[in-house]
Every structure is written in C-alpha cells, then in structure tokens.
Image (cartoon, rainbow, N blue to C red):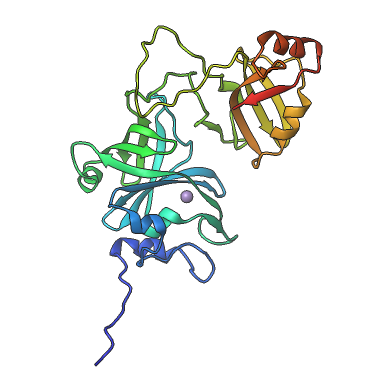
Amino acid sequence: MAEPKRRVKTPAQLREYRRKRDFAKTTEPSGGDARGRRARASKGNAFVIHRHEARNLHYDLRLELDGVLVSWAVPRGFSWVPSDKHLAVRTEDHPLEYLDFDGVIPKGEYGAGTMMIWDHGTYETRYMGLGEALEAGEVKVVLDGGKLRGEWHLVRTRGEKDWLLFKTRDRYAREEGDALFPLAFDPETRAPSAGRVRAMRAKENVAPFADAEWLYELDFAGRRALAIVRDGDVRFRGADGKRLPAALPELAGELAGIRCRDAILDGVLVAADDTGRPDGKLLAKRLKSGDTAEVAYYA
Ligand code: MN
C-alpha cells in the first residue's frame, strides 16, 4: 500500500511571509504545522504581542484568524489613554506557530533583531468577526492578556496598510498622566519614560467589594516609593516624584541585580520594629538621618 502523501499545507496567506524569509538562516517558524504549544492549545482566538527590537523598536500585535496571525507593527506601542492614537502598520500574516516564537533573528535577515513575547492571551471582536471587520476597516477587539485588558479599536485610515490603534473608554482606560506602568516608552532611549510615571495612590470613598479581577494587598505603614533601575544604577523617588534623601544601599544593591537593563518598580518602603511590625517612625528616622534600621521594599 502506498504511503499517504504527507504534504505540509501552507495557507496561501503565508506566501508573502515565506517569500521574505530564508528558513535556513532564521529560526522563525516556516508555517504549516502549528507546532507551538500555544498554537496547539488555541481555540481560534489567540493573540500575541511581540516586542520587536529591530532597526526601529516596535510592538507587533497579532490576532489569530483562520490558521494565521493577522499582524500590525505599532511603532509607539500601546497606551491606556483613549486620546492617544497610535499608528499601526498592517504587515504580512504570520503562521500560527509564531504565538510561541521568541528569539533573535540574525543580522542581514528580514526583521533582524530580538523578538520577545511581550503579552499573549485571547481576544474577542465586537459586533462582527475579525475577517469581516478587517474588510470594513474597523476592528473592535477586546483583549484578555497578561498586560493588556479591555477594548481597543483599530481603524484603517489610508490604503490597506495604515491603521490607527487606540484604547476605548472602559473600566481599563486611563487619563493622561495617570499611567500606572509605562506602556508608552521613549523611542529615543528605548527605555520606559520614568518622568511620566507616578506611584499609584489609593483612593478613599470606595465601598468594599469582591471581584475576581482585583487583587488585594495589605496596606503597610511605610512610604510609597518608585525604584528606578537603569543600567545597574538604582534611585528611589517618593510618591510626590521627588528623590528620596537616603541612598538605601542594601536595597539598591539587590535591585541592581534584577535581570533587566531598565525597570520602574512601584512599592512601599517599610521599616519593622523588634517585633516585626511595620513602624512608620523608624522608617522616617532612617530616611532622614541615615539611622541603621533595616528597610524592606515591597514591590
Ligand atoms: Mn516586527
């Protein structure tokens, strides 16, 4: 009996993707076998966002549709602020295995540079399916990812390729200057723009509630502070944006060792008394006079 022919089926939409790449040189998937873990587990509505440090740093948003990933390159990344309208350039469809792809595309190859999975999850479109929405030039998509949540709109502006991406007003949207963590980044330094970031402040007058989408934490008697890590250099800033007077070398040493070049952490500085209870007065003393009380940082 003849062996059944085993031909890897490649969706026609992947022709441009394959034409641009030399699979002897790049480690990117060639498409057609959906080998990735996420690709296999997908129920047809997966999304992934890559942070692509190519010649120009950008983010690639990819939405699954009929066995491929419809893709846009977003040079300025994502913003929680609805009035921030960011250009999103439609690029060639990518194979489903790209849901799992993470790696360095070698120099000289198409898209050379580091491709890192920045977020992933599932999506739903509103009012119509993704295929129909693409044709209409307006995609209303609700993302359920690790970083991104809520509804975003993609609107085609010019030709086939130029779209605008922005957040819609929902419970996840934020106002200008209200950024909890910097989705917006400085394209020049390729670093989170620390100047715009403020420590998140608690609000009163909210009635207690239970919601699985919220996490609750103890409010320690301490001082809210941002830790800004840059190339091994660590600075602390108070919730007012001002630099803290004390250097806190024991914390700076530890934070300098975290495995990234640039980071902004939001946390609370706490000094404990002999019984282990947070003591605001001890902390104030340490920050003012360089007292030796040990300080912990809850990020
Ligand atoms: Mn890209």
The residue depicted at 72 percent of the width and 17 percent of the height is: 274
> How far across and how far down the image is residue 97, in percent?
40, 59
Image quarter (top left, top right, bottom left or bottom right) of the N terminus: bottom left
Q: Nearer the viewer, residue 189 or 125?
A: 125
Q: Residue furthest front?
A: 275
Image quarter (top left, top right, bottom left or bottom right) of the C terminus: top right
> How far across and how far down the image is residue 109, in percent?
54, 62
Q: Does residue 17 lie above or below 181 as drawn?
A: below
The residue depicted at 26 percent of the width and 84 percent of the height is: 4
Q: Does residue 168 lie above or below 5 as drawn?
A: above
The residue depicted at 23 percent of the width and 42 percent of the height is: 133
Q: Does residue 44 lie above or below 137 as drawn?
A: below
> How far across and how far down the image is residue 60, in percent?
44, 46
Q: Nearer the viewer, residue 231 or 203?
A: 203
Q: Nearer the viewer, residue 292 or 155?
A: 292
The residue depicted at 60 percent of the width and 28 percent of the height is: 265
Left or right side of 47 for 220: right
